[in-house]
Image (cartoon, rainbow, N blue to C red):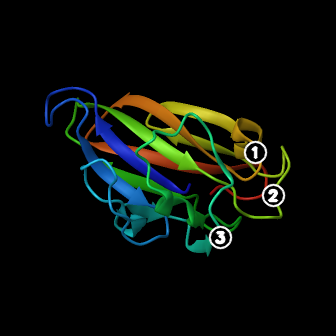
């Protein structure tokens, strides 16, 4: 994963549309482009796996799934999960019963995985899973994209990455 946001959809703990978390996977703080909270390093939310990081150039294209206000600085760092050890997992404290939208931003900047099928993994947010997710197939090579999940919190929003058929989750 390159980066992610948690946006409140309901009104229990925050106003609808309020961004409550922005995590920049393996990167430093990136200022917000929309007046919301800045994107901060993800280590405080990482609870398992994903100790390896990498940096790379900006994507050459951005998929239409990415909001226009997304800052360019989130695309240059990544956290990935090697085959050994625990699967990569994140946790975000969100009040029980709160409906939220979770946005995950993906960009495969590694030159060794530039074709569909080169990197395939599962990604889950609470009870919603995309099995066999392939960022190259979804958006194209050297292209940043975003996946959105609307879920209801049980007190913690869990974001899990599981090894799939090829390479490592990122």
Depth order, front residue of 63/165: 63
* Residue at 14% in and 30% down: 12
Which callout, 2 or 3, points at the residue further toward the start of the chain? 3
What percent of the width, then of the height, locates residue 74? 48, 60
What residue would you read off at disc 3?
56
Is label 2 in contact with label 3 (beta carbons under 8 Å)?
no
Residue 136 is marked as 1
* Residue at 64% in and 43% down: 122
Residue 113 is marked as 2
Q: Nearer the viewer, mark 2 or mark 3?
A: 3
Q: Which secondary structure, mark 1?
A: helix
Which callout, 3 or 1, points at the residue further toward the start of the chain? 3
Depth order, front residue of 65/16: 65
What percent of the width, then of the height, locates residue 48? 48, 63
User: Would you say 77 lies left or right of 59 here?
Assistant: left
Alpha carbon distance from label 2 to label 3: 13 Å
Answer whether residue 108 is visible to the viewer in this image: yes
Query: How would you rate the neighbour count of disc 2 (Cα within 10 Å): few for under 14, some for 14-19, many for 20 or more?
Result: some
What percent of the width, then of the height, locates residue 130? 61, 34
């Amino acid at each position: 994963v390159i980066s992610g946001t948690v946006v409140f959809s309901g009104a229990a703990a925050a106003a609808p549309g309020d961004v409550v978390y922005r995590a920049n996977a393996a990167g430093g703080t990136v200022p917000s482009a929309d007046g919301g909270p800045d994107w901060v390093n993800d280590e405080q939310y990482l609870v398992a796996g994903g100790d390896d990081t990498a940096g790379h150039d900006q994507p050459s294209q951005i998929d239409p799934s990415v909001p226009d206000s997304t800052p360019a600085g989130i695309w240059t760092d990544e956290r990935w999960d090697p085959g050994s050890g625990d699967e990569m997992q994140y946790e975000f404290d969100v009040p029980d019963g709160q409906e939220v939208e979770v946005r995950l931003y993906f960009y495969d900047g590694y030159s060794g995985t530039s074709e569909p099928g080169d990197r395939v993994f599962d990604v889950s947010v609470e009870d919603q899973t995309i099995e066999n997710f392939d960022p190259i197939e979804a958006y194209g090579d050297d292209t940043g994209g975003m996946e959105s999940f609307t879920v209801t919190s049980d007190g913690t929003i869990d974001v899990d990455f599981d090894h799939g058929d090829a390479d490592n989750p990122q």
